[in-house]
Image (cartoon, rainbow, N blue to C red):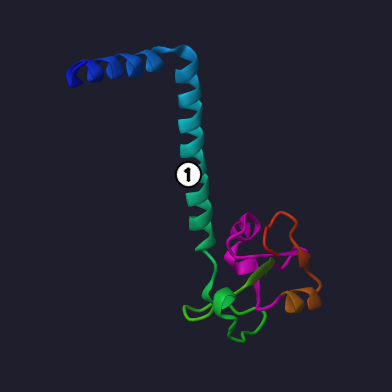
Amino acid sequence: MSIQESIGKLKSRAVGLLLDDEAFTITLILLVGIVAFGLGRGSVEQASGVLPAAAVTGTVEQLPAESPPSASSSILYIASKSGAKYHLPWCGGAKQIKEENKIYFNSKAEAEAAGYTPAANCKGI
């Protein structure tokens, strides 16, 4: 048997496997699973890069409780003047608070001392 004949037989077997419904379905499911896992992992890595520098370094500038953030500060918690919950800056609840109603805190203890409780839908608190 020559090399040409061996290659021809291998090609016909590979094409036959691809045309087989069961093998094609299994291969397609595996490929979709791998792609979905990669996309999910990438989105988690991207979301984890959103943490403020203060959360990583452990340093926080002291700000008065109601002063808005400056470009050089990192606020860790935000609450509404009319609400009862505090949030992390990237949580949906914090994004919905109007700027004029926001209160800023540097720590959980500071927010809780002011009478606020953690928001249940804000992961990481």
Residue 90, quarter of picture: bottom right
Quadrant showing the N terminus: top left
- Residue 107: image location, x then y, percent: 69, 77
Residue 64, quarter of picture: bottom right
User: Is 34 a magenta residue?
Assistant: no
Relative to 101, say whether 19 is above or below: above
What residue do we see at 51% from left, 63% from top?
A: 50
- Residue 104: image location, x then y, percent: 64, 74
- The foreground one among 104 and 7 is 7
- The foreground one among 80 and 1 is 1
Mark 1, Cα crowd under 10 Å, few <14 / some 14-19 / many 20+, is: few
- The foreground one among 2 and 71 is 2
Which stretch is magenta? 80-107
- The foreground one among 55 and 16 is 16
- Residue 96: image location, x then y, percent: 61, 56
Q: Which residue is mark 1?
A: 39
Say left or right for 124 vs 16. right
What residue do we see at 65% from left, 57% from top?
A: 93
- Residue sticking out furthest to the bottom: 62
Relative to 108, say whether 32 is above or below: above
Label 1 is placed on what type of residue?
Leu
Say left or right for 18 vs 33. left
Relative to 54, say whether 88 is above or below: above
User: Is 83 a magenta residue?
Assistant: yes
- Residue 99: image location, x then y, percent: 58, 66
What residue do we see at 59% from left, 58% from top?
A: 95
